[in-house]
Amino acid sequence: MRKPNETDPESVLTFGALPNLANITVILVEPATAGNVGSAARAMKTMGLGDLVVVNGVEFKTSMQAKMLGHGAGDLLERARTVPTWEEATSGLHWLMGTTHRKRRAQFPQVLTCREAAGKIASLSQKHQVGLVFGREEAGLSDAELRQCQEVASVPQASEHPSLNLAQAVMIFAYEIFTASLGEVPVPRRNLATVHEIEFLLQHLSKSLGAVGFRPHQGEPDSFLRSLRRVLGRAPLEKRDVNVLHRICQQIDYYVSEQEK
């Protein structure tokens, strides 16, 4: 009897395309080696993910190393977008899931396991655009970058000294997202605001509160803005929620302008 092996098409467990995977963007922030980008692309392609964005990273499209380690994912590498800023990378996305391997302070939301994060991504991506963000090989994502993510996730590990490289982390998350997307997945009914719309709202709230004389504790506006972001990030905000809060701010702005006449 012939033994099944990975070169035998009949022995490989495969599935058809899962539509929600097209709504997921993998973002690599400042990757240092082209090989890691290639390997990450290969992991994505294997698990049905096809949208890759590289922020201010190494040149990889002309790299032979990226092509070799990205074997079978040349089309994904070719259409991958390269952008210089976080703002461009996250444009149009409704939810950002940051990744980390470090313990974080109380200013950050509770860190999810990659499996918990995958379940949420699988659900949200049924009708919304979701970003999964990976940081630099040596330092990961900065605190400032993680604060701009609605949630943060990590891969549980037995070792006290994590040894996963960038591409391995991408592979684990991609696999968990793929398996979480199989079968019946709950579809969110809400029409979520984008991450940029929420950031604009945060700036508006901060400005309007400042106009009526509100001063954050110990005069730290950045710290207060972080607190606001954490409060608003506890549940996905709908567009109508953002519009209501903008109207409140606009009324505050109008009141202040009338008092100054």
Image: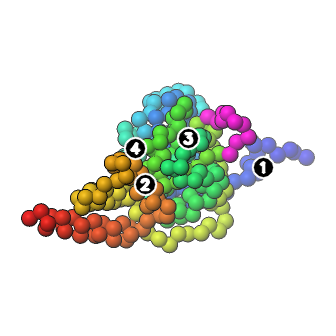
In magenta stretch: residue 197 = no
Q: Which amino acid is tagged 4?
A: Trp
Pair 4/2: label in front: 2
Residue found 66% across the figure and 61% down from its top: 182
- Name the element at disc 3: helix
Residue 231 position within the rendered picture, expressed as x and y whole percent measured from the top left: 45, 60
Which quarter of the figure has residue 195? bottom left
Pair 4/1: label in front: 4
Dominant SS in magenta: loop
Residue found 50% across the figure and 61% down from its top: 234
Judged left or right of residue 87, residue 101 is: right
Residue 142, visible in the rendered structure = yes
User: Counting residues from the N terminus, which is met first, the one under dot 4 or under dot 2?
Assistant: 4
Is the residue marked by circle 4 packed among few (<14), some (14-19), or many (20+) residues within 10 Å? some
| Quarter that holds the C terminus | bottom left
Residue found 53% across the figure and 37% down from its top: 140
User: Counting residues from the N terminus, which is met first, the one under dot 3 or under dot 4?
Assistant: 3
User: Counting residues from the N terminus, which is met first, the one under dot 2 or under dot 3?
Assistant: 3
- Name the element at disc 2: helix
User: Mark 3 sits on what residue?
Assistant: 41
Q: Which amino acid is tagged 2?
A: Ser
Residue 39 position within the rendered picture, expressed as x and y whole percent measured from the top left: 59, 36
User: Mark 4 sits on what residue?
Assistant: 86
Q: Which amino acid is tagged 1?
A: Ser
User: Mark 2 sits on what residue?
Assistant: 227
Measure how far apart labels 2 and 1 are at the Cα level: 52 Å
Which quarter of the figure has residue 3? top right
Pair 3/4: label in front: 4
Is the residue marked by circle 3 packed among few (<14), some (14-19), or many (20+) residues within 10 Å? many
User: Mark 1 sits on what residue?
Assistant: 11
Measure how far apart labels 1 and 3 are at the Cα level: 24 Å
Measure how far apart labels 3 and 4 are at the Cα level: 20 Å
